[in-house]
Image (cartoon, helix red, strand yellow):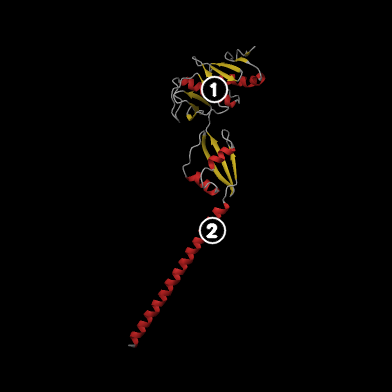
Amino acid sequence: MAERYEVDNRERKEFLREKRRRKKKRKIILIILLSFLAVIATAVLIVWKVFTVKTVVVEGNEHYSDKQIEKFVLSDDYSWNSLYVVLKYRFLETKEIPFVDTMEISLKNPHTLKVHVYEKGILGYLYIPTISQNAYFDKDGFVVETSKEIIEHIPQIEGLNCKKVVLYEKLPLKDEKILKSLLATTQTLKKNEIVPDKIMFDGNGDISLSYGSIEVLLGSSENLSKKILRLSYILPQLSGMQGTLHIENWTENTTDIIFDKAN
């Protein structure tokens, strides 16, 4: 009987020790869980109270104003939170903005968003009657946007037959030489910072430019870059005048450039 009592006593002590261990383990788990919840609650509170949008700094934009870009970025009910805005534009699909390729958004501090705008590199546009819209193209001749909107300082192209376009595909011009001439002209004019109001092609592919009351006849695409370089020197001298500038016959051997002043 004494031996049986000792066995029962040992089992009871072991049971109590195991019970205390389990209780201690549950207590540790509870402390860890509460600590984790406290950390989460603190983080949520910080995000909720600290990361609030007070200032939006915009750079890289030309087509849209700072206020317009800010309105695009802070577009939903949660955009008051700066951290939310950054994560949204980093991980979620956002609504496309016409004429904007992409935007990079970062935090300068918890209250200040920095928005860098990368606009689509537009060199000119053609009016497409079948869709009653303008087709804007880039340096490679790809249509990057169609819109009824007219952008300032982007030249309109006239005289080219283009009945329909497909977004993100090349301008469907029948003559590849004309497309090359168009792209060379728009790129060289932009490089020399003398972008005209209009660029016109006639039936022979000869080029003329319109700068308000000044018309410039460039002729064929031969010696194009040198003709446009000469134009960049002459054009400022014609400010306020009306007439036609003849550069179409310019060559390295025939350097005469004539300006027919309108009466």
Give the label, 2 or 1, closer to the camera: 2
Look at the image and tell me in which quarter the C terminus lies. top right
Q: Within the image, what quadrant is residue 113 found in?
A: top right
Tag 1: residue type? Thr
Say what secondary structure mark 1 lies in: helix
Decide if residue 33 is on the left or right side of residue 194.
Answer: left
Please report the residue visible at 48 percent of the width from the left and 22 percent of the height from the top.
179
Whether residues under marks 2 and 1 lie with C-beta atoms below 8 angstroms apart, the answer is: no
Residue 193, percent from left and from top: 60, 26
Q: Which mark is residue 76?
A: none
Please report the residue visible at 48 percent of the width from the left and 45 percent of the height from the top.
91
Tag 2: residue type? Thr
Which numbered disc flags the more N-terminal residue, 2 or 1? 2
Q: Which residue is mark 1?
A: 185
Q: Which residue is mark 2?
A: 42
User: What is the C-alpha distance between the residues marked 2 and 1?
Assistant: 60 Å
Residue 222, percent from left and from top: 54, 17
Say what secondary structure mark 2 lies in: helix
